[in-house]
Every structure is written in structure tokens, then in C-alpha cells.
Amino acid sequence: MRLIASCSLLWRRYLWRILLSMFLLPMCPLAAHATEGGIGYYVPGMAATLIDRAPVQTGWVFEPMYLNYSGDFGAEIDTPIAGLIAAGIDVRINSVVGGALYTFDTPVLGAKYTAGAYLSWADVKVSGSIESAVGSISRSQSESGLGDTTLIPLMLAWVDGNWQYNAFLPIHAPTGDYETGRLANPGLNYWSADPTFGIAYSNMESGFNATLFTGLTLNEQNPDTDYRSGRLFHLDGSLQQMVKAGDGFVTMGVNAFWGNQISDDKIQGGILGPFRQKTAGIGPVIGYMLPKGKDNIVVEFRWLPQLDSTNTTEGDYFWLKFVYQMGTGKNK
């Protein structure tokens, strides 16, 4: 269910044109080219702000997160999903993700080295019209269960004054519940890697922070449907201002994203041909950061409305993130 009334739609698009240009005008646009089901492992807002940078202090980081997403396809778009062809898809997702990272004291390539993993649980509801031999059939399904697992064997951080440079290697493992012929699946049923690089600027005197991440999602074939989603190039960025509040800091700003598929999906028989996706959006982010000696606590809320999408659902991402950093050593 859309959370923004139609009377504010024009305002959102106007705001998007102004603010999104802050992040995207330097980039050369690629041709608009979707993943299976229109939704893949790249999730806007997963890594976008100050708290998503690689840790630079030895010790543990625990990060529970909650994601709510509501979106839909246009009624005229045929979408491949779990071995079916569906149109007019409406998607509702509630997901809880728990992550743990450990930053080692010994540097790697001159950088702080971190490794970790994220486990997920998802409640998924999908409605749409299914193509069959007797015509279109309306169907709605709901499923809850274990989602896919993200492994991070490599996370590096280099610090140079106010600047930090990051390199991640998330690997998504198909541990989630999945069945062919089912509209709603908590898992995607294929492996994927998403090498990501980031640059961040943080000025503690002024409280200004800017972060930009760029990655390339590389998908393997779904063995149950013989469908291989194309490669997706994506950007996520944020501008934030920290303001002293009590013993900590309130953080306020905007975060934006842009994703563009740069290669075709492939399926045996090629019945669908090219089915590429693009998506972009921008929204507010607000949080609270509480330093406690070597430990740090951060709570952050993000809203990311999709304001320009092709061959993927269009809706709203809502994130609530909690980070607890348990430091055991010195900063880099």
C-alpha cells in the first residue's frame, strides 16, 4: 500500500530531480536494461550512510536491522518469477536481518580488515495475475521463513585524515526457503557476489559527513528455473549533518540510490528476451549516535522511495538499523 498520497507525488518527483542530481549528474547514464522477479540481492539503502562504512576499530560490531518494503509492477509488464510469468505484481516484504562483524588488529594491505555474516528472516506477500492455458488467473500468496545469508569474507578500510576508503566483498548464499511455481519466496535460490567500493568524508569539527558506495552485483543461475539475472551496477550515497544532543549526536540528512542493469537476463529457450531494470530514488535519513568510550551505539531510520523505475517494482523502502560497536583495540 503506497504511503504517499497522490497529491504529493508531483512534489516527490520534483524533489527527486533537484536532489538526485547532487549524486548522479557526474555519472554517464547507461542504457536502461531486471532480475528474476524484478527484485534481486541489491537492496537500496543496505549500505549508504556513515554507519555503513567499514569499521576501523578492533573488536566486534553487532547490527540488527528491520526492512519494510511495499511496491508493485505496472499491470502491462510480464514478469518472470519462480518459473511463472506474472503481471500486475504487488509485493510486501518485512525482513529482520542480524549481522555480526569482527575487525582484526593486524592490517591487510595497509587497511583495517573485517569479516562477518548476516542472517535474515523474511515475511513475503505477493499478488498478481498468472498466465495459464486458460488465460490470466489472479493469485495471492504469503510465505514466511529463513531468508538468504550474506557472507562478508573481506571488508577493508583505509583512513587518511578526514577521508576513508572502503572495499567490501559480500557473497549471498541461497539458504532461504524457495519453491518453483510459488509467487512468494523468502529466498532467491541462486548465488551472487557484490564487490563494492566506497569513499567517505567526515569532519568531526563541523559535523558534516558524505558517503558514496558503488558496486556491481554478479548473479549465478537459478538451478530450478535455469534463469540467470544480469549484472547490476549500483550507487548509494548520503549527505549527513551531526548535531550535538546530550551525550551523543543527532544525525540528519538525505540518502539516495541509483541502480542500472548492464547485461541481459538469460534463460534457456530465451522466451523473454532482454528484461533489464533500472531504479533510482532519494529520501531522508535521521539517527542518533552515542559514543561510550571504546563502544559506540547508533540508531538510524531511513526512508527511500523509488521515484524512477523500469522493469522492477516501484515503492518505498523503510530501514531501521541498530549498531553496537564493542571496541577492544585502538582505531586505525
Image (cartoon, rainbow, N blue to C red):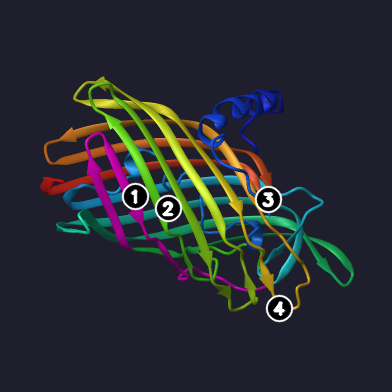
Q: Amino acid at mark 1?
A: Pro
Q: Amino acid at mark 2?
A: Val
**Residue 130, magenta (yes or no):** no
Q: Secondary structure at mark 2?
A: strand
Disc 4 vs disc 3: which is toward the camera? 3
* Residue at x 55%, y 51% (from the top left corner): 93
Q: Secondary structure at mark 1?
A: strand
Q: Amino acid at mark 3?
A: Ala
**Residue 155, magenta (yes or no):** yes
Q: Which residue is mark 2?
A: 96
Disc 3 vs disc 2: which is toward the camera? 3
Tell whether label 2 touches label 4 (CB within 8 Å).
no
Q: Residue 285: x and y, percent?
A: 43, 32
Q: Residue 108: x and y, percent?
A: 21, 60
Q: Which residue is mark 4?
A: 268
Nearest to N terminus: mark 1 or mark 2 = 1
Tell whether label 2 touches label 1 (CB within 8 Å).
yes
In space, the residues marked 4 and 1 are separated at their CA atoms by 39 Å
Q: Quarter of the image containing the N terminus?
A: top right
Q: Nearer the viewer, residue 149 or 21?
A: 21
In space, the residues marked 3 and 2 are separated at their CA atoms by 34 Å
Nearest to N terminus: mark 3 or mark 2 = 3
Nearest to N terminus: mark 4 or mark 1 = 1
Count residues near mark 4 (Cα–Cα under 10 Å), then give few for <14, some for 14-19, many for 20+: few
Q: Is residue 55 left or right of residue 210?
A: left
Tell whether label 1 touches label 4 (CB within 8 Å).
no
- For residue 254, above or below residue 108: above
Q: Nearer the viewer, residue 28 or 268?
A: 28
When asked about the image quadrant of residue 36, the answer is bottom right
